[in-house]
Image (cartoon, helix red, strand yellow):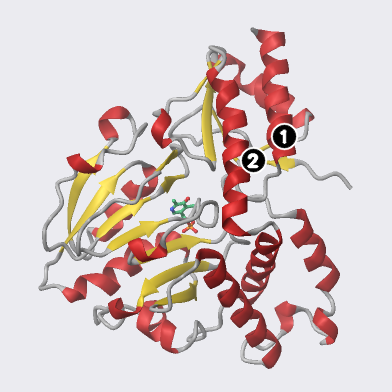
Amino acid sequence: MTRIYNFAPGPAALPQEVLTQAAAEMLDWHGSGLSVMEMSHRGREFMSILETAQRDLRELLAVPGDYRILFMQGGAIAQNAIVPMNLVGRKPQPATVDFINTGQWSIKSIAEARKYATVNVAASSEASKFSSIPPRETWRLTPDAAYVHVCTNETIGGVEYHFVPDVGDVPLVADMSSHILSRVIDVSKYDVIYGGAQKNIGPAGLTMVIVREDLLGHALSICPSAFDWKVVAENESMYNTPPTYSIYIAGLVFQWLKRQGGVAAIEQRNIAKASLLYDYLDSTDFYGNPVAKDCRSRMNVPFSLHDASLNDTFLAGAKEHGLLQLKGHKSVGGMRASIYNAMPIEGVRALVDYLKEFEKQNG
Ligand SMILES: *Cc1c(COP(=O)(O)O)cnc(C)c1O
């Protein structure tokens, strides 16, 4: 069997240990004689899988007791509608919501929120082609906004917040799809955190929402019951049949993370991995990275070849070296290496070795 290094932005690499364990448990989970996929979601076995996953996630992120962890479906893209449907009802209609526009995922969130609220783009880095985060002092926030939305890691542009914005008493909502669990965060500084699982948590199909309890119970009447956070919370994420197998794999990833030493330990490894790659890209004019140094993502590293006509040769050679999915997003072009928690440093070393070799042959 050959496993390649998978630099895909999502669905993304999973820890090999997790896949091995899932394979071993596939036909007979813990002597039940069943695969997790075949179990009743309300049965004792699956309930224990879900509860353990939630408990481990709470422990890993040190989620305070007054926050609920919800396992939902529809991805972060569905939350773009679910967030306003659950939060704007706390204000007289039409409510205003503030957005910070830092790239393609912010743009998607903004477009969807416009269906439910008046959107104020309080700051944008569009003029710099989304290569930075607008400094907090420049944000023009609405004093009584229903919430402020940020995308704390722009997966496509490769910009990441390395600070938590202070937005006063207005709820702060963060799309953390592509860097959740990659770094220590103070959950109490946010009011809602959400993300699709397929970058840093597990397989596609599961969406994670962490919401402070007092924000529940304000959903608009048009909000589907399955997307009303309060209904989901009251039913322990079982209002409808949850994505059971995705939850099981996410649970194995949480246990793997705990064995790695938790989020603080993986953060140190992520810093080392990102530095290795950025330091090399910065050391040569053959490659370039457009992002301002103080907001470079540790998870998604876009880079370009100085001569774009070499792109296809670069990708073909990378594939021969077992380095896959390095093609950049069509809106940015060039290359992108996504180096989530499950990417070992050996994979980043192999990539840097290949970057050097390709430069030597083509520079
Ligand atoms: C991948 C991604 C999304 C979209 O997630 P889906 O699960 O496809 O809905 C949204 N936001 C960010 C930051 C992402 O990286």
In the picture, the disc for residue 256 is: none
Q: Position of residue 357 (x, y in %)?
A: 73, 16
Q: CA distance from mark 2 to mark 1?
A: 7 Å
Q: Residue at x 11, y 71 (%)?
A: 93
Residue on which the image places disc 2: 7
Q: Position of residue 325 (x, y in %)?
A: 64, 38
- Of residue 198 and residue 134, the one placed in the foreground of this image is 134
Q: Position of residue 300 (x, y in %)?
A: 53, 40
| Up-down relation of residue 208 to residue 289 (above or below) | below
N-terminal-most mark, 2 or 1: 2
In the rendered view of the protein, which quadrant contains the C terminus?
A: top right
Q: Residue at x 57, y 36 (%)?
A: 274
Q: Residue at x 62, y 34 (%)?
A: 326
Q: Would you call the spot at circle 2 few (<14 residues within 10 Å), some (14-19), or many (20 or more)?
A: many
Please say whether residue 131 is visible from this viewpoint.
yes
Dot 1 falls on a residue whose secondary structure is: strand
Please say whether residue 11 is visible from this viewpoint.
no
- Check disc 2 and give the amino acid type: Phe
Dot 2 falls on a residue whose secondary structure is: loop
Q: Residue furthest top?
A: 363
| Up-down relation of residue 169 to residue 133 (above or below) | below
- Check disc 1 and give the amino acid type: Leu
- Of residue 93 and residue 279, the one placed in the foreground of this image is 279
Q: Quadrant of residue 23?
A: bottom right
From the viewer's perspective, is 311 left or right of 292? right
Q: Quadrant of residue 260?
A: bottom right
Residue on which the image places disc 1: 323
From the viewer's perspective, is 268 left or right of 103? right
Q: Residue at x 57, y 40 (%)?
A: 271
Q: Would you call the spot at circle 1 few (<14 residues within 10 Å), some (14-19), or many (20 or more)?
A: many
| Up-down relation of residue 83 to residue 52 (above or below) | above
Contact, mark 2 vs mark 1 (Cβ under 8 Å): yes
